[in-house]
Image (cartoon, rainbow, N blue to C red):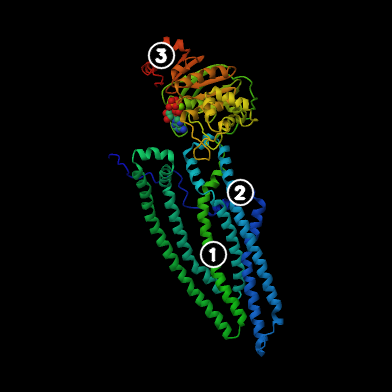
Amino acid sequence: MAFKIGGQNPKSNTTGSESDYKKVTAGEFFAVAIWALGFVYRLDRLRTVLYVFFTSTNGLFNIAYAYVIARAIDLVLSLNSGGIFIFKSVYHILGLLLVLFAVQTVFQSVSGYIGNALSVTLRPKIVRAFYTKLYTLGIQSLEQPEINNRITRANDNLMNIFSFVDDVVREFADIVGLAGSAAALIAFSPLLILAMVVINIPYILWDKRHRGFIYQYSYENTEGFRTAGWTNSQLNSSISLQEIASTSSFSFLDNKYINFYNRYNKKWLAITKRWRLGNGSFGFLTDFVLLYGYFKIFSGLATGAITVGIVTFYTRLMSMVQNGLSNVFRGMNDLTEFAMRVKDTYQLFQFKPLFADGAVQMAKLKEGPKIALDNVSFSYPNSEKRVLNNVSLTIQAGEKVAIVGHNGAGKTTLVKLLCRIYQPTNGKIVVNVDNLSSLALPSWYQNIGVLFQEFNTYPQLSVKENIYIGNASEQVDEVAIRLAAQSADAAAFIDEFPAKFDQILSEKFKGGIRPSTGQWQKLAIARFFYRNAPLVIFDEPTASIDAVSEYNIFNRIYDFFKQKTVIIISHRFSTVRNADRIIVLDHGEIVEEGTHAALMSNNGYYAKAFTLQAKGYAANDNGVAGV
Ligand SMILES: Nc1ncnc2c1ncn2[C@@H]1O[C@H](COP(=O)(O)OP(=O)(O)OP(=O)(O)O)[C@@H](O)[C@H]1O
Ligand SMILES: [Mg+2]
């Protein structure tokens, strides 16, 4: 079948392997609830304790009111038989009511304030705890598809952690209130209480089932939401809109977005309609039980078994028990639903890094280390393919090595192994005398500086900070920042920025400008000159940089990092020719290595590719680099 543009891939609305999402067992529910309470408590101990206390006691006030008013009615009736109402006789009851009002107002205000304060102050703390957790899991863990799915959903539900805890506290308050009013009413009619509980059960089951449907439906559409979310953000971004406008593809993308939601909402509305109608019908059943309750109360009054005051007390209690039951049951369904949503976050917080860190502390090196790869092979966790195959390579201390090869040859993968983002599947990497996997990672990271092919840009930071962040664990060194900028051929354009080194780098911030793509790359290179680490790795550092700057930067790299070990990956052969040694990687294996001269006389891949590129330069000798 031909690919249909705009068609729906039937598999695209499911997100994968986790099949346990629909259910939350009682054990899981309590595990998630206890974890969430503990999590919030650790983030803000005092407010959490106060909030739990002031909120959970709220239900008891209503019972106290009902009772005091009942006593007041009876008292007034007994006094009033002579037709004279004497304020003096009931002032103590009115005083008691006033005290109750005042205390409840204080409790409600405090609980309301602390609830608001918690929901605001917890927000950044929860976000921070989440990204800190991801950071400690290690990058290898984060590249697992299953963890990625969880991260997406956990992120969507991050703020539900507080809502969940809030609901747990309210549920507790409702249970306290319900227990109080039920205990007071049970003496009058145990059967009434039993009937009220039983009649609520069909309602609760119906409600629970439909919430499950809604959650399952939205879960199965996670990928659809994500796809629509991408489209939405592209239609919101001035950078994406450049291309969208010039290709007139707005309507195409707009339709993709709205069609997904139209389709999604149609079924959602159908489920919700059935759910709400059912809730209403089952709710009606409870009214019959209330009628039975009124009948019992009024017949008690008729026979003189209870006083008028107690009639008011029981009728109030009855509606409190009914409301309490429906709140408690509905609250349980709310909580189960929240637990489903918070479960991903809970499970993510239980994950441990895939690899335990090593124990050997590497000192801060003065000079570049020697690196030896001994029969290193590697496959990515989610694929069988060997991306590196028995690579053995020794890079001497202070050597300048260039790695070249086709797209997909395994160059960046090799860098990732050197950074221990991944561990070799077979073989080992030895740094000076230590196995890389035995090192404590922070002690290794202080000795390396890696400019990744997918380097970071920090538009929210100034030029100076964009460079300083290369070595942010030490004090700012303004002189070194300027020197780094000069070495990366960036100083000239920085000096032309209105705010020079204090320039903010996005046109979306006040007074900001947007650097060109090549300027961004130069700033990233400056960052690694500033880092000045003993082992420097540049993965395609100059892909977007003009030929003159590229020539300058490469010459400076060899000079600047004289005492350091340098690995440069590049597709531009003219710029790697001055390396001490050039290594050609093909399909994860070293196929050639040697100096430029040696490889040229070898007449293999390197010589052919070099000659081809040199011709390109010659054909474009109007000063623009041909690649
Ligand atoms: N996270 C990953 N999971 C699975 N496969 C991957 C992953 N990253 C890379 N690969 C695969 O590993 C192979 C080597 O990729 P790598 O990025 O190392 O190539 P490269 O030599 O750096 O190429 P380029 O010149 O395009 O940058 C490719 O086939 C790629 O599809
Ligand atoms: Mg690469």
Image quarter in which the C terminus is found: top left
**Distance between the alpha carbons at the discs numbered 3 and 2:** 61 Å
Q: Which image quarter: residue 366?
A: top right
Which mark's residue is nearer the viewer, 3 or 1? Answer: 3
Hey, what amino acid is under mark 2?
Phe
Q: Amino acid at mark 3?
A: Ala
Quadrant where the N terminus sits is top left
Q: Nearer the viewer, residue 50 or 353?
A: 50
Q: Which numbered disc flags the more N-terminal residue, 3 or 1?
A: 1
Residue 523 coordinates in the image, percent (x, y): 53, 28
Q: Is mark 2 within 8 Å of ligand 1?
A: no
The residue labelled by disc 1 is: 327
Under tag 3, what secondary structure? Answer: helix
Q: Which residue bears the numbered disc 2?
A: 39
Q: How many marks?
A: 3
Q: Compute the Cα span from label 1 to label 2.
A: 25 Å
- Residue under the point 63% across and 62% down: 109
Nearest the camera: 537 or 173?
A: 537
Residue 335 drawn at (x, y percent):
53, 57
Which residue is depicted at the point 58% across and 43% down?
128
Tell me the residue at 50%/55% (across/down): 337
Q: Is residue 37 left or right of residue 260?
A: right
Expressed as whole percent of the image width and height from the top left, the position of residue 143 reads 49, 36
Image-based side of 465 in relation to 600, left or right: right
* Quadrant of residue 536 within the rendered picture: top right
First in sequence: mark 3 or mark 2?
2
Q: Could you say where residue 561 lies in the image, as x and y percent from the top left?
A: 57, 19
Mark 2 element type: helix
